[in-house]
């Protein structure tokens, strides 16, 4: 719900509601245009709330889209276009941050979590082997429990 | 006057909550029944008081009492009646009131339906619920009071945010809150159990219905939000990995894990400590979501710093509850006896893998959501973590989970037979793959990965059916025996199959839309025709229109297939006059499970208009799948062993014949 509030706020900031990609921006070569679209989806609209320039209708997003297409038309590789945009707008513009000192924990998180989870599973399994199991129930509780459990014998 | 009475009711609710926080806990210690009984009566009283206060606020909105600041800021006399009702929670103060209302509703439900709970557990659970209520009532009264008056009263309100003037606002927040506030019950059960220092399989059985109910609502709430964003925002996206979305998605992931681990605990008494921890973490994530959304920290770290009252208050609530519960856990968990053993290849084993993957996925979303905030606070560097990051990491983590889902229900408890499960599923896998290839060629084009994605979705659906198939022994025994076995299966077996199949349907939808959707951005003049998704769209022209509180320019499109008109739609650009705020109202046409999405852009100088058209094949599967999942949750909830509040039955005289058939 809040995102809609924020979006509404972002919309308010915009001078004129326009579209994201407009027909006049589109490159003639479909292959180049496809590259431009893919790159646009990875670039943040700096004045919006968490929108890519591909989705946004802000003027600044339009400028960036044109800039991306300009560079692509000039023969830049995807990498070179991103480098150029980052050199002008900073790392903040990238929706998929690059792996580096600052983001090592971000990118490392899934891997670390999998390893940590797997290791703790192993450790617990080792520790547990051979120990007596189950909590002790009183006779009364046992009777209650078997009454409750009685019905799903078929599972 | 009525407003002040509402305000007063909220203060009384706080007083009730305070009593409720202390007396039952002491009662449980001393085994004093009278003191423990305060919990039941108190919870009902607290709910009634909060409901009354909420009713008063609703009344103020409905009669457009602009002397109330909250109404003045978020309503308008011309707003249609339904938005006067839903507008109550379409703002910060009101949505916190809804939060509290649902929290106390759950307390009341536990009080009413918890008759079969042990007295001390019930008293402690309700007391913990009351602790949370105290915190949030204080938060509302001290920082977000919706009952403040304006003097002199303005003649007209400032209008409800136009983006919120939609039926979505009436449905989405209540469902969402029923979901993530519902997990408070699991949290309270966990804390109460830790206080008592004792947890067993029965505990898991008591917690499961609440988890299931909360999960079902949260599933629907998230899906509804996604569909709302899809049709309202006008660019056809349905999931943005926005921090606010993540805030609701993380409790869902943790809650899904909890649902599964509670199952292991209930059946096998294993994973006890983990289940308790997960119950605490799930609600902690709900609290954190509330902090992220309500503190303004997401808009910018600086916005948070400039008016930190609310943010700091929720942050304190967050630290006290999460910190307190985790410390309690650290103290008490070692005292809990270890549960049953199981081999790695077993249903428990599969559910452990499920938990591992869901937890890691949840942790990854959490890291991605908080990383930019933390980095900026610590070093001042600004980075963005957006959809490309989440799609990559989350996708990679979820892929193996989807493959193992159908195996889980087919493995037996304690020690499973992977080979047996493989033998049962390879036909299913082959069928799924074949169907995916066929589907792929029918839709023609797209990367190879999508075949795998489609196969995964179909594998889930067919695997869920196969599970029921084998349980009933269809093909091995006579049809009548198979039928009797099928109808003798517990409802939870159907719930599982539905939920897993629903996930498959959602995966299919996601893969189909991502791969096969087509987009057309063109300039059209009245009378022009364009093709999209096998349909031709005839643009008939623009026309002005006025609604109760907006004006719009709308374009009419006639859709033809093979020359025959099959449908027509309006797509509009709207201007809400009170706030001078523009919105787009896309024209959406449904053909089977697919949709044609028509959105208008700027007018061009030569009398045309920019039109953006998407063909979204099978997009309804995305939300349809979630509805099936939620329905699975509901079916599971009606399982006899979980039925909330089912009176304890004496030993049954005779079991129905069907139940005597061994299923396997």
Image (spheres, coloured by chain):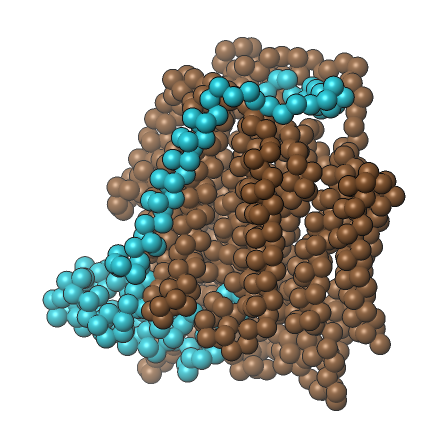
Instruction: Confirm whether residue B641 shows in the render.
Output: yes
User: Toward which corner of the image does residue B149 lie, by quadrant?
Assistant: bottom right
- Reply above or below: A143 against B592: above
Q: Is residue B319 above or below residue B74?
A: above
Image x and y of residue A92, in percent: 32, 68
In this image, B483 relative to A143: left or right? left
Residue found 59% across the figure and 42% down from its top? B331
Q: Is residue B109 visible?
A: no
Where B74 falls versus B293 (above or below)?
A: below
A74 relative position to A26: left or right: left
Quarter of the figure with the N terminus of chain B = bottom right
- Residue visible at 85% across and 45% down? B35
Q: Nearer the viewer, residue B281 or B663?
A: B281
Position of residue A62 measured from the top left corner of the image (x, y, whole percent): 31, 75
Q: Extreme right residue here?
A: B34
Looking at the rendered image, the quarter that the C terminus of chain B falls into is top right
Q: Residue at x 49, y 50 (%)?
A: B250
| Chain letter for the cyan colouring in the rendering | A
**Residue A42: horizontal and vertical position, in percent?**
30, 62
Residue at (63, 25) in percent of width and height: A135
Residue projecting furthest to the bottom: B152
Residue B568: x %, y % from top left: 48, 61
Q: Which chain is brown?
A: B
Between B73 and B271, the residue placed more toward the observer is B271
**Furthest-left residue in this view:** A75
Kindly indicate the quadrant of the structure image that contains residue B418. top left
């Amino acid at each position: 719900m809040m995102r809609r509030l924020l979006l509404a706020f972002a919309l308010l900031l915009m001078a004129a509601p326009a579209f994201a990609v407009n027909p006049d921006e589109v490159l003639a070569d479909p292959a180049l245009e496809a590259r431009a679209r893919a790159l646009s989806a990875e670039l943040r609209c700096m004045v919006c709330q968490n929108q890519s320039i591909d989705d946004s209708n802000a003027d600044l997003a339009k400028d960036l889209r044109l800039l991306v297409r300009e560079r692509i038309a000039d023969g830049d590789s995807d990498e070179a276009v991103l480098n150029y945009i980052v050199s002008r707008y900073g790392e903040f513009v990238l929706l998929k941050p690059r792996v580096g000192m600052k983001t090592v924990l971000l990118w490392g998180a899934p891997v670390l979590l999998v390893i940590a989870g797997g290791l703790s599973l192993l450790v617990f399994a080792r520790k547990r082997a051979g120990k007596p199991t189950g909590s002790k129930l009183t006779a009364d509780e046992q009777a209650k429990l078997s009454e409750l459990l009685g019905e799903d014998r078929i599972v | 006057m009525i407003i002040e009475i509402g305000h007063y009711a909220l203060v009384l609710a706080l007083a009730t909550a305070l009593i409720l926080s202390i007396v039952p806990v002491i009662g449980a210690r001393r085994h004093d029944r009278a003191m423990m009984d305060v919990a039941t009566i108190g919870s009902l009283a607290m709910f009634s008081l909060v409901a009354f206060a909420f009713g008063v606020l609703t009344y103020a909105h409905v009669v457009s009492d602009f002397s109330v600041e909250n109404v003045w800021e978020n309503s308008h006399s011309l707003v249609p009646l339904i938005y006067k009702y839903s507008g109550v929670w379409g703002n910060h103060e009101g949505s916190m009131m809804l939060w509290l209302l649902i929290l106390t509703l759950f307390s009341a439900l536990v009080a009413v339906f918890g008759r079969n709970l042990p007295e001390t557990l019930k008293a402690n659970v309700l007391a913990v619920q009351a602790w949370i209520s105290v915190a949030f009532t204080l938060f509302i009264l001290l920082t977000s009071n919706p009952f403040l008056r304006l003097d002199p009263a303005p003649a007209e309100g400032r209008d409800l945010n136009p983006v919120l003037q939609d039926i979505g606002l009436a449905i989405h927040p209540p469902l969402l809150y029923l979901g993530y506030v519902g997990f408070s019950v699991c949290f309270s059960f966990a804390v109460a159990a830790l206080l008592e220092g004792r947890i067993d399989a029965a505990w898991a059985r008591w917690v499961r219905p609440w988890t299931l109910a909360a999960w079902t609502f949260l599933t629907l709430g998230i899906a509804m939000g996604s569909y709302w964003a899809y049709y309202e925002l006008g660019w056809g996206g349905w999931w943005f990995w926005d921090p606010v979305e993540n805030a609701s998605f993380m409790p869902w992931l943790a809650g899904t894990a909890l649902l599964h681990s509670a199952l292991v605990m209930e059946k096998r008494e294993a994973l006890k400590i983990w289940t308790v921890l997960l119950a605490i973490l799930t609600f902690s994530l709900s609290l954190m979501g509330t902090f992220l959304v309500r503190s303004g920290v997401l808009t910018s770290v600086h916005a948070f710093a400039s008016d930190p009252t609310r943010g700091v208050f929720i942050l304190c609530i967050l630290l006290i509850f999460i910190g307190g519960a985790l410390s309690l856990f650290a103290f008490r968990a070692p005292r809990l006896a270890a549960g049953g053993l199981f081999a790695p290849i077993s249903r428990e084993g599969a559910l452990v893998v499920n938990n591992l993957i869901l937890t890691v996925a949840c942790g990854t979303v959490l890291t991605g959501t908080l990383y930019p905030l933390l980095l900026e606070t610590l070093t001042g560097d600004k980075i963005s973590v957006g959809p490309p990051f989440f799609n990559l990491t989350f996708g990679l983590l979820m892929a193996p989970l989807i493959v193992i889902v159908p195996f889980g229900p087919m493995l037996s408890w304690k020690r499973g037979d992977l080979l047996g499960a493989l033998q049962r599923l390879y036909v299913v896998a082959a069928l799924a793959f074949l169907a995916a290839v066929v589907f792929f060629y029918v839709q023609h084009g797209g990367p190879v990965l999508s075949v795998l994605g489609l196969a995964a979705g179909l594998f889930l659906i067919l695997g869920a059916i196969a599970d029921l198939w084998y349980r009933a022994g269809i093909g091995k025994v006579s049809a009548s025996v198979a039928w009797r076995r099928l109808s003798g299966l517990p409802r939870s077996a159907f719930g599982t199959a539905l939920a897993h199949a629903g996930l498959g349907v959602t995966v299919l939808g996601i893969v189909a839309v991502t791969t096969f959707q087509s987009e057309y951005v063109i300039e059209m003049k009245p009378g022009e025709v364009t093709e999209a998704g096998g349909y031709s769209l005839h643009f008939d022209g623009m026309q002005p229109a006025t609604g109760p509180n907006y004006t719009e320019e709308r374009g009419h499109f006639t859709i033809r297939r093979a020359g025959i008109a099959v449908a027509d739609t309006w797509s509009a650009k709207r201007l809400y006059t009170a706030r001078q705020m523009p919105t787009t109202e896309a024209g959406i046409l449904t053909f089977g499970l697919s949709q044609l999405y028509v959105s208008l852009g700027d007018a061009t100088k030569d009398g045309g208009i920019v039109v953006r058209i998407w063909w979204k094949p099978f997009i309804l599967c995305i939300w349809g799948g979630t509805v099936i999942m939620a329905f699975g949750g509901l079916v599971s909830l009606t399982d006899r062993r979980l039925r909330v509040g089912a009176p304890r039955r004496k030993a049954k005289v005779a079991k129905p014949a069907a139940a005597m058939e061994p299923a396997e």
